Amino acid sequence: MKTVDQENLKDNTMVIFTSDNGPEHPVNLEESKGEWEAPTRDFCFGTPGNFRGMKRYPYEGGHRVPGIVRFPGKIPAGTTSDELVVATDFMNTIANLAELETPKNNILDGTDALPAFLGKKTARNKPYLWVFPTHEDTYFRMPHMAMRYNDYTLLGWFPEKLENETLMDWMKSSVPVKFELYDLSNDPEQRNDLASIKPQLVDMIRPLMLKQWIEIRDEGPIWENMN
């Protein structure tokens, strides 16, 4: 920040301070001797507050984080926004500010988030999707993805992995088959699963999740050593 100021670039430089995930936890299930949900372990290195989950969790505590943006030439000091922005929006935002074209040979899932920093609504042509299918032993302990749809978040579970199936084969052939639904407007802690209460809403937004996941799954590489 001092260097930006010293170089007289303050008014024409956007500085972003945020995180790509919620607070970390120090050890895995085996290292904690089976106490996967132990508060003394799971809340090390920070706390998600009232939100459920932490880093690597598809629940809100896994990816809902604050962000600070300084851009004196564009953003009035002291303003706030509750508009949702994700890290994949940064490339589009920066490219548009720098008046550069985004790559044509890569699929970019982000959108220009500058309106959010100015207290306005952002335009997006598809819902936000967070995916975390596999990591150590977490793949069978929690949902594998979450999709935000207005005030709701839909979480999807893959089918159970067969014993003789590799993680890679399982991930590359799976789509969510079980779902949880939460209304974040009145249940940000994600305590009340509404999937059985609002099945029509689940049926309406589930195809959006499946479509995006299949695109990501099929575009992604195959890692031969993931077993």
Image: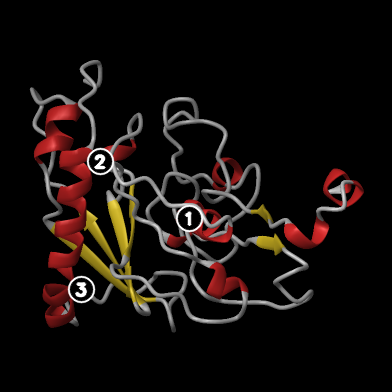
Percent from the top left, x then y, of residue 215?
18, 49
At which x and y percent is residue 12?
74, 59
Residue at 33% across, 32% down: 137
Q: Earlier in the sequence, mark 3 or mark 1?
A: 1
At x 87%, y 53%, the residue is 8
Q: Nearer the viewer, residue 136 or 85?
A: 85
Tell me the kind of residue under disc 3.
Ala
> For the residue labelled by badge 2, is the local secondary structure a helix, a strand or a loop?
helix
- For mark 2, what is the residue? 140
Can you name the residue that lies furthest to the right here? Answer: 6
The answer to whether any part of residue 131 appears in the image is: yes
Question: In the rendering, at what x and y percent does residue 128 appear?
Answer: 35, 63
Q: Tell how many labels.
A: 3
Judging by the rendered image, the residue that carries numbered circle 3 is 195
Q: Which mark is residue 63?
A: 1
> In 3D space, how far apart are the residues under numbered discs 3 and 1 (Cα atoms)?
21 Å
Nearer the observer, 134 or 4 = 4
Q: Residue 224, located in which quarter of the rendered image? A: top left
Q: What label does residue 205 carry, if any?
A: none
Give the image location of residue 148, x and y in percent: 34, 68
Q: Residue at x 54, y 82 (%)?
A: 120
- Label 1: which secondary element: helix
Sequence-first tag of 2 and 1? 1
Q: Amino acid at mark 2?
A: Phe
First of labels 2, 3 by sequence position:
2
**Which image quadrant: the C terminus?**
top left
Q: Tell which tag, 2 or 1, sits nearer the viewer.
A: 1
- Answer left or right for 146 relative to 160: right
Label 1 packing within 10 angstroms: few (<14), some (14-19), many (20+): many
**Image-based side of 205 in relation to 114, left or right:** left
User: At numbered mark 3, what does the secondary structure look like: helix, strand or loop?
Assistant: loop
Q: Residue furthest top?
A: 225
